[in-house]
Image: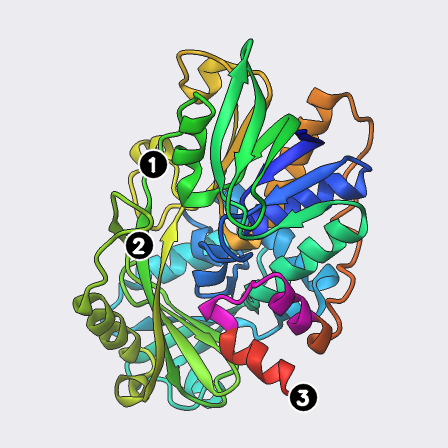
Amino acid sequence: MDRRTDVLVIGGGATGTGIARDLALRGVDVTLVERDGLSSGASGRSHGLLHSGARYAESDAEGALECLEENRILRDIAGECVRETRGLFVQLSADDPAYFAEKRAACEEIGIPVEVLDGDAARAAVPGLADAVERAMWVPDGVVLPSGLVAANAADARDHGARIRPHAPVTSMTLENGRIADVALGGDADETIAPSYVVNAAGAHAGQVAAMAGVTVEMRPTRGVMISVEYGDLEPVLNRCRDPADGDIIVPHDDEVVLGTTSVPVDDPDEYERSDWEIERTVAECATVLPSVEDAEKVRTWWGVRPLYAPEEADRGGRGISRGFHLLDHADPSSAHDSDGVENVVSIVGGKLTTYRAMAEATADLVCDRLGVNAESVTAETELPNAADPARLDALVREFDGQGPTDVDLVSRNGST
């Protein structure tokens, strides 16, 4: 017999678990499935930067404001999943001073708090900063621990009645009369789900999931490398203040820093080249800001794949542009470029880790509208239970097999205390 559910969410990253939580808090019956452990995709393989919006201020004011708003919400609700480090945008002598001025003006226009300091003051604030730093700008960036954040969302969804199924890949879907009738699961689940509505939150794999549903989602994934090296006592996130390029972000952990990243298109989000030149270039470029990382001991290296939406990438022209998110309602063929509509499925693509909660709220709003559920989202003002307890968070990460490489050092440390 098929197991029935109001909503089947496919994808166990930040967005998928955020959707499951939002819907469960509204009283909707939800099942979430993920083919691997939770946060095994882009969420758990990111650099873990909590954006203030400053990175996108001059290119996309609306997207930057959304980052700022979600940054503030996550600081209120996400407990130990967020570290309040601040961020410093630095201009080197080789960088265009007009770019710095444009970013500062854009931040001030949006309402992103900034404080400008000269090179000497920057080096006093951040020991080890390069002599070539001419000036810098404080912004309210931070650090996210994605493994804990995803686990906390999943646990709260479960506490409100949701079923969370890691290691349950979707193997096929059955369509009847323009609707998804059944979804077959493999792995640990080995069952069939009969959903009233399906949410495709599969990240870089959204195109493959959409194809099983008989609809089209055009993805243009890109890979990026992150390298964690031994380095103690860095407080802020460091961003090089130039047009986004390889190796321009340094994210602090306790005794390590994460260096990132590159942007290289891939055809398959599972099978792609991992090139030494990406590591070498990223380390060398980050060393122009913080020189001692060039010779620091490498602890771990990983690649993540960004779930970029192809039409946006084509329209907006590539790297550095704010990654907006897109809700594709497949009941409306024109909205998703489908030749045939499917009434009970929506895809959520693009976006950033910082804006996962807003993405989840927008998706849950659409789903509730389609199901006739009259309930508002409460996730912006409802703290994530367990998020203030690092040991509990770490236990949840282990339970959901949710450990990604981004924060493995911090989760391991929390678990040992």
Tell which tag, 3 or 1, sits nearer the viewer. Answer: 3
State whether residue 45 is above or below residue 85: above
Q: Which of marks 2 and 3 is nearer the N terminus?
A: 2
The Cα–Cα distance between marks 2 and 3, rounded to whole angstroms, is 34 Å
Q: What residue type is labelled 2?
A: Arg
State whether residue 245 is above or below residue 288: above
- Crowd tier of the residue under label 1, counting other residues whose Cα lies within 10 Å: few below 14, some 14–19, many 20 or above: few
Q: Toward which corner of the image does residue 26 lie, by quadrant?
A: top right
Label 3's element? Answer: loop
Residue sitting at x 39%, y 54%: 102
Q: Earlier in the sequence, mark 2 or mark 1?
A: 2
- Disc count in the image? 3
Q: Earlier in the sequence, mark 3 or mark 1?
A: 1
Residue 397 among those drawn in magenta: yes
Q: Which colour scheme is used?
A: rainbow
Residue sitting at x 52%, y 17%: 175
**Residue 361 appears anywhere in the view:** yes
The Cα–Cα distance between marks 3 and 1, rounded to whole angstroms, is 47 Å
Residue sitting at x 42%, y 87%: 123
Q: Residue 178 appears at what percent x and percent y?
A: 54, 12
Q: Which residue lies furthest to the top in this view?
A: 177
Overall secondary structure of the magenta stretch? helix
Residue sitting at x 39%, y 35%: 208
Q: What residue type is labelled 1?
A: Arg
Residue numbers of the magenta segment: 393-407
The Cα–Cα distance between marks 2 and 1, rounded to whole angstroms, is 19 Å
Comparing 81 with 56, the one in front is 81
State which quarter of the image contains the N terminus. Answer: top right
| Residue tagged 1 | 316
| Residue tagged 3 | 417
